[in-house]
Image (cartoon, helix red, strand yellow):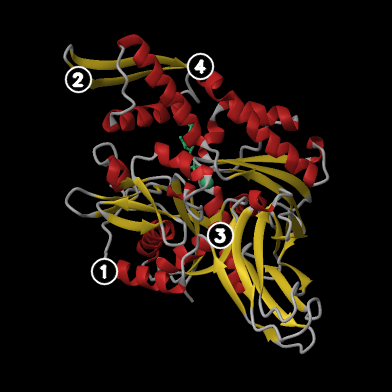
Amino acid sequence: MSRVIGIDLGTTNSCVSIIDGGKPVVIPNTGGYKTSPSMFAISQDGKRLVGHLAKRQAITNAVNTVSSSKRLIGRRFDSPELKRAAEYFPYEIVRGENDDARIVISEKTFTCPEIAGIIVREMKRVAEEYLGEPVSECVITVPAYFNDTQRQCTKDAGRIAGLEVLRIINEPTAAALAYGLGREQEEKIAVYDLGGGTFDISILELGDGVVEVLATAGNTFLGGDDFDRRLAEYILHEFKDAEGVDLSGDLMAMQRIKDAAEKAKCDLSSLNTTEINLPFIANDADGARHLNLEVSRETLEGLVVDIVKGTLKSVEQCVNDAGLSPADVDHVVLVGGQTRMPMVQASVSEFFGQRPHKGVNPDEVVAMGAAIQGSVLASDDRDMLLLDVTPFSLGIATFDGHFAKLIDRNTTVPARKSHIFTTTRDDQSAVKIRVLQGDSNVATDNHLLGEFVLADIPQASKGVPEVEVAFDIDANGIVSVSARDLATGKEQSITVNATGTLSEEEIERIIRDNESYDLPTAGK
Ligand code: ADP
Ligand code: MG
């Protein structure tokens, strides 16, 4: 039996793990690195590059290099988050057929699931090379705070990569599985995950082979990238003050500043001050200009303190939703590269009144948890039970524009709720239902998952037909809808106009398109 791989498909870095000798092992790529940048590029000579190879040429080929595309996946082109991202990304983002965001590099348009699929395929290749055998099944992790559309897109990415996705699991839950492996006692833990692009907090209860998520909260649009951006803006500003030159329109200079900002930020996790040196950053009538700037940890902290405090609001909500107080939490597990920042650690420690647990590697623990879940699913291991929750309330739009909740946030999945619909006009043959996810009372403030049309309703006076519609959230957090006519007991036909996800034909076209590309090896 081939083995199930666990993939942490991160905004910034991706990681793949398998169970070997009963323990999760992280698989290094060809270059020996245990994580690979979640980047994809088309080089000037038309080659497709993934991972480290894509990252290495990003400065000189910024417009054709895709990074952090997870920030765009499953998002509507018109959404405010997308507009914010588009301002900062050097690559072109266009509107797709389903109002989704698509990426254009080297004059070719890619959907976001396709880019994610290319990265998943690279992780599959890394695993196959290590194992010396083909891999066909996987578990992929997503931020706990991903909605249905983002989850569906991630599942499609797995298919595009040629893998069967046995399960989509939440990143903090995966981290908890890896943390809990081999621990016997009952305990409540908080997993605080701050990566490059997303922030998640989950409170879980472990014990007796059961991992139960009590509550989850977060923000899929907040992460280390925002720290970099603040520091990059500061660098730009300081340079303008000192030299009178505005570099914001210079793509290459901006890419170098962005890179330098990230590096300085990371250095300041272990140093009190660091130098930023970017020679020949500009050239004008007065000759070449060089950027030299010293940045202190204190300066960086001042630039991002509100972001860090902002994460604590979600933490507080999550602890409340779990029905606990901070002191009830036995251990705090930190996940994600950005949690290496001392101010992040200090803020979390202060909130919970304890220092975070140090025993797990924040870059690898999510992939390890995915591998554990993969082996549980493959072997049908009944000794471990994973109970996760849905991060948003699920409901429908009412006639007056309100949001009627059917399944509350933090309900354990799988979950099912049915609702009886009727007609408002005589002989009405169809009813349209808008299904949304979110927590606002105003329907349009929530995320529209799709429109469902109940068709072929038998002729009758208004209010007489009774159609029972069942809303299901499966263990992946993915929503489906079915309907039944109560009078006849017959299944009612339903058409789904999902927004933001790909149609079956599109997925098949993308799979065919990608078959011809044999990607060069990542790493060294
Ligand atoms: P993701 O889950 O989004 O793929 P990661 O967990 O790999 O992200 O974290 C990437 C983020 O962590 C980046 O923003 C990176 O700059 C940041 N990071 C990595 N190392 C450090 C460090 N030593 N100090 C501060 N931030 C760091
Ligand atoms: Mg991550």
Numbered badge on residue 149? 3
Q: Is mark 4 within 8 Å of ligand 1?
A: no
Circle 3 crowding by C-alpha within 10 Å: few under 14, some 14–19, many from 20: many
Numbered badge on residue 283? 2
Dot 2 lies on which element?
strand
Circle 2 crowding by C-alpha within 10 Å: few under 14, some 14–19, many from 20: few
Say if 319 sits above or below 494 in the image: above
User: For the residue marked with disc 4, what is the amino acid?
Assistant: Thr
User: For the residue marked with disc 1, what is the amino acid?
Assistant: Ser
The percent position of residue 505, horizontal first and vertical second, equals 41, 74
| CA separation in Å, label 2 and label 4 | 28 Å
Label 3–label 4 contact, CB within 8 A:
no
Left or right, residue 136 beside residue 403:
left
| CA separation in Å, label 1 and label 2 | 43 Å
Numbered badge on residue 299? 4
User: For the residue marked with disc 3, what is the amino acid?
Assistant: Thr
Is residue 83 visible in this depiction of the protein?
yes
- Residue beneath the point at 44% across and 71% down: 136
Q: How many marks?
A: 4
Q: Earlier in the sequence, mark 3 or mark 1?
A: 3
Left or right, residue 484 beside residue 231:
right
Q: Earlier in the sequence, mark 3 or mark 2?
A: 3
Q: Is mark 1 within 8 Å of ligand 1?
A: no
User: For the residue marked with disc 2, what is the amino acid?
Assistant: Asn
Q: Earlier in the sequence, mark 3 or mark 4?
A: 3
